[in-house]
Amino acid sequence: MTDKEQLTQLTSHIRKLVELTEQIRETEIYPVSFFSEAFDLTHKIQDHLHAMEVSQIELFDQKIREHQAQISSVDRPVRRVAADTSEAIHPPISASDELPSAPSGPPAPVSRNTAPPAASSSFREKAETSLNDKMEKAKLTDLRKAFTLNDRFRFCRELFGGDEQRMNRVVNELNETYSYETSLTHLKSVTDWDFENDSVLDFLKLVERRFL
């Protein structure tokens, strides 16, 4: 399913959820069916959002690789020009041009000094660094963007007892913290985690990356 199809389905489920809640707005006691239908729609909405997020991250990575390939293709002709310039300045010595060796010692070495294409390499390195920095910042502005789909399910199951709403609430609260230390203090105050647990340590690594 394409992103546009996912977006169409997402919009449809959101409309149904709105219609469902409007139907009980004036009702004092909500029917049991409301909760089952609402939960079902909510899960579908989350599934579409997860699928769209993964697709967009893959698309972003693809664009980065294409951009890096373009930079490399620009760099290769520059190196070829530098090599051609070197050959023009120092043409190869043919057998007829060779001078007899002097009896007093070996022949003087032929100078092959040419300036390396430092500017091109520097340009490529700066461009790649800039792209990598942008990718990191784009993913870590919101802590949720640092989670893969597997991370979400794993952390929800192992750290939040399968309570996705609680996990989202804690993540939103962590997004408001201003340092790793305050994030750690907050987690200790709202959870009873074992901070030596592997899953907890993996979660903390992603939290720490927000402040690098």
Image (cartoon, rainbow, N blue to C red):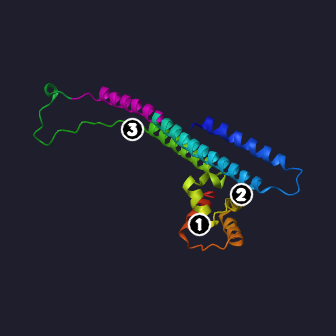
Q: Name the residue type under label 1.
A: Glu
Give the labeled residue for mark 1.
158
Within the magenta stretch, is there residue 181? no
Give the labeled residue for mark 2.
172
Q: Is residue 128 left or right of residue 112?
A: right
Give the labeled residue for mark 3.
116
Q: Name the residue type under label 2.
A: Asn
**Please, what secondary structure does the residue beneath circle 3 have?**
loop
Image: magenta residue range = 70-92
> Residue 130: x percent and y percent?
56, 43
Q: Say few, some or many: other residues with alpha carbon within 10 Å of mark 2 (under 14 / 14 to 19 / 20 or more).
A: some
Looking at the image, do the residues carrying marks 1 and 3 touch, with CB atoms under 8 Å apart? no
Q: Residue at x 60, y 37 (%)?
A: 3
Per the picture, the main secondary structure of the magenta-coloured stretch is helix
Front residue of this view, candidates 144 and 136: 144
- Sequence-wise, the earlier of marks 1 and 3 is 3
Q: Residue at x 66, y 68 (%)?
A: 184
Q: Nearer the viewer, mark 1 or mark 3?
A: 1
Q: Nearer the viewer, mark 3 or mark 2?
A: 2
**Please, what secondary structure does the residue beneath circle 1 have?**
helix
Q: Quadrant of residue 158?
A: bottom right
**196 relative to 56, above or below:** below
